[in-house]
Image (cartoon, coloured by chain):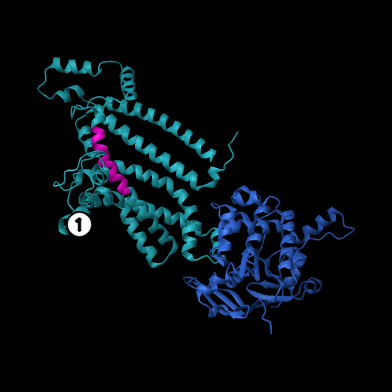
Chain colours: A cyan, B blue
């Protein structure tokens, strides 16, 4: 297991480096967008003196490397500055909006894995047969339309024409749940309100499913591709020649080696959902970070933009880190690789 | 009367393509008696490997295959069994050894797990510790000196020869009556192949296992098998006791095959042998009136 630990430490270091790079990049990009943030923040009626004063407070007149210096040292103290849009510390905004988004993305990720992988396994096992073709069509539909299109379609079908699901929001307004973690599914359980818990799941389902659909399709297609490849390997024939039942061969002998190459993409898809969530949240009026992100971008709220992007990058890095770790645990060749000199 | 371990009668196989049907086996008949080692010899594409897979019942389920003829295993007709019954035979009454041991063992499981799985075919409730014990014993029989280390390893951590021994041990651990060896060790280098074949020979002699040995290598077959069948383009063209066929090959194809075996007889120098070899390396046509 020493190898896994080494790998983990190395990956954490690389991730931190990437995070620094991302912070520089996003900081620079935010600064070169045309328009004066101080002017936008103060509105059209502000006097020039007010604008100049705010520019001074925001260090906007210093050289750019100095500005980054201020930004980096504040970032290390957990301070992302104040949002010009909400007039609150960005960290506070993110803490408020992030849990809703994470809840949505985690739910979508779970759906992606729980539906996508089994579909891929079934598809590979019945390669070339009716069930396989059916699943492939569904998977292709899933990947060929973006999440926000699915969001609109699902909302029309299952919330409007056929009112099976609520049309928007995270929970019915009748419930007043004390906020502890910000994750409604956890908070409702903490206060022991099961009805609110199920109401939250009920609200969560459509947006999560819309967000997950392309991931489900992607996961199913990847799993199928890798598994049909694995099925042609001698060790699968060997498993058959030892008379293991077909499903056991699929689950135990073919799936595990096939999962390793799929996992990288699934991890990336999972992280990409944070970005896709932007529009899904907008459609389902989901009070999450993505809606906040869109709002601050439109208002050129630099601190908030940088904060939002940093959080999303961090999510990507964490997802990658987890995937690398999972792959190392699944693939003995990585776990027991001799260290190169 | 005692049934032969395996009896194949007029076995034919064709693969259905889009436009036409390709016939792969033409009325193949062969018998393997109890404790007998029988080789099926032929070039690539002659139908050796599909015969083995038909005996295992691996091809029958595929929709594009047409099979006729009879395969009797220990006196029971495979065609009359359900797919489940055929599956029950595999891994317990008959098992198979593959060409390339490294790719035939599953890359993501330890050797001990793979032994455990195989042992569970006969005894579903056996626990990992007992499986380990039995595997250690049989790995000792195939001359593996550190069975504990091998059991803890993954296939990629072992050499080809080591993997081959593991596979032989795995093929025999459930005491099958028939062992099918499909070009065993062809992927290994010659000396290792020779060692493992001798080992396999001793193992099956000891256990009284019948062997269906598939090979294109007559030199190997001569050492290993009691009787042999020569297959060419899906037809059995010659059969007989190994020494008889080698002494007096009747079919031109067999003669051609025999001519392809390099031999260094006493008195030859190495360069003679090389000259000798260059003769059959030249392309030649095979004529006969079959």
**Residue B10 percent across, percent down from the top left:** 61, 80
Can residue A36 be seen in the rendering of this structure? no
From this viewpoint, which residue is outermost toward the front? A192
Tell me if residue A266 can be seen: yes
Label 1: how many Cα within 10 Å (few below 14, some 14–19, many 20+)? some
Majority secondary structure of the magenta segment?
Answer: helix
Q: Residue at x 64, y 63 (%)?
A: B173
Where disc 1 sits, the SS reads helix
Q: Position of residue A122 (x, y in %)?
A: 41, 61
Residue that label 1 marks: A158
Image point 38% across, 41% down: which residue? A319
**B1 up-or-down from A255: above or below:** below
Quarter residue B116 falls in: bottom right
Chain assignment, label 1: A
User: Residue at image x 68%, y 68%?
Assistant: B213
The image quarter containing residue B5 is bottom right
Report if residue A86 lies within the magenta region.
no
Q: Which residues are drawn in magenta?
A: A93-108
Out of A204 and A240, give the one closest to the viewer. Answer: A204
Q: Position of residue B193 (x, y in %)?
A: 71, 57
Q: Does residue B61 appear left or right of residue A271 in this picture?
A: right
> Does residue A266 appear to the left or right of A258 in the view shown?
left
Q: In the depicted view, which residue is nearer to us: A234 or B245? A: A234
Q: In screen coordinates, is A313 left or right of A303?
A: right
Given residues A322 and B127, the one toward you in this image is: B127
């Amino acid at each position: 297991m020493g190898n896994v630990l080494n790998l983990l430490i190395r990956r954490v270091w690389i991730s931190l480096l990437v995070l620094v790079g991302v912070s520089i990049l996003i900081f620079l990009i935010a600064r070169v967008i045309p328009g004066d943030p101080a002017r936008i923040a103060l509105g059209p009626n502000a006097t020039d003196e007010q604008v100049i004063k705010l520019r001074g407070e925001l260090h906007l007149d210093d050289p750019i490397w100095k500005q980054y210096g201020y930004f980096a040292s504040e970032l290390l103290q957990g301070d992302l500055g104040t949002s010009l849009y909400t007039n609150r510390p960005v960290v506070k905004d993110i803490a408020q909006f992030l849990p809703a988004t994470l809840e949505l993305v985690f739910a979508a990720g779970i759906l992606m894995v729980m539906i996508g992988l089994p579909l891929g396994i079934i598809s590979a096992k019945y390669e070339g047969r009716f069930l396989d073709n059916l699943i492939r069509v569904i998977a292709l539909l899933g990947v060929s339309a973006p999440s926000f299109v699915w969001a609109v379609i699902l909302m029309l079908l299952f919330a409007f024409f056929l009112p099976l699901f609520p049309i928007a929001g995270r929970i019915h307004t009748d419930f007043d749940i004390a906020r502890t973690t910000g994750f409604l599914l956890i908070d409702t359980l903490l206060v022991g309100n099961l009805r609110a818990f199920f109401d939250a799941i009920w609200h969560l389902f459509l947006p999560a499913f819309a967000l997950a659909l392309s991931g489900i399709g992607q996961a199913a297609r990847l799993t199928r591709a890798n598994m049909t490849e694995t099925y042609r390997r001698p060790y699968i024939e060997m498993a058959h020649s030892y008379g293991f039942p077909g499903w056991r061969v699929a689950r135990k002998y073919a799936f595990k080696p096939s999962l390793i190459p799929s996992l990288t993409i699934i991890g990336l898809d999972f992280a990409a959902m944070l970005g896709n969530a932007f529009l899904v949240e907008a459609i389902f009026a989901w009070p999450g970070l993505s809606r906040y992100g869109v709002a601050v971008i439109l208002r050129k709220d630099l601190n908030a933009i940088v904060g939002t992007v940093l959080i999303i990058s961090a999510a990507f890095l964490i997802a990658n880190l987890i995937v690398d770790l999972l792959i190392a645990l699944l693939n003995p060749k990585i776990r027991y690789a001799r260290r190169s000199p | 009367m005692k049934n032969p371990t395996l009896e194949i009668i007029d076995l034919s196989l064709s693969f259905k393509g889009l436009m036409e049907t390709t016939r792969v086996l033409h009325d193949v008949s062969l018998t393997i008696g109890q404790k007998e080692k029988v080789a099926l010899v032929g070039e690539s594409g002659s139908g050796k490997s599909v015969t083995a897979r038909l005996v295992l019942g691996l091809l029958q389920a595929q929709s594009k295959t047409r099979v006729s003829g009879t395969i009797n295993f220990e006196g029971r007709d495979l065609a009359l069994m359900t797919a489940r019954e055929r599956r029950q035979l595999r891994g317990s009454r008959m098992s198979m050894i593959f060409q390339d041991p490294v790719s035939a063992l599953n890359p993501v499981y330890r050797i001990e797990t793979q032994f455990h799985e195989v042992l569970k075919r006969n005894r579903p409730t056996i626990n990992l510790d007992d499986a380990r014990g039995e595997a250690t014993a049989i790995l000792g029989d195939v001359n593996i000196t550190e069975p504990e280390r091998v059991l803890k390893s993954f296939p990629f951590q072992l050499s080809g020869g080591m993997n081959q021994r593991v596979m032989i041990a795995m093929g025999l651990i459930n005491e099958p009556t028939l062992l099918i060896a499909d070009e065993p060790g062809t992927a290994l280098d010659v000396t290792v192949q020779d060692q493992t074949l001798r080992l396999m020979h001793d193992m099956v002699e000891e256990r009284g296992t019948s062997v269906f040995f598939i090979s294109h290598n007559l030199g190997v077959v001569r050492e290993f098998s009691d009787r042999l069948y020569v297959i060419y383009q899906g037809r059995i063209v010659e059969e007989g006791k190994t020494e008889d066929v080698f002494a007096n090959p009747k079919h031109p194809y067999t003669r051609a095959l025999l001519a392809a075996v390099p031999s260094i007889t006493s008195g030859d120098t190495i360069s003679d042998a090389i000259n000798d070899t260059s003769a059959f390396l030249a392309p030649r046509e095979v004529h006969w009136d079959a």
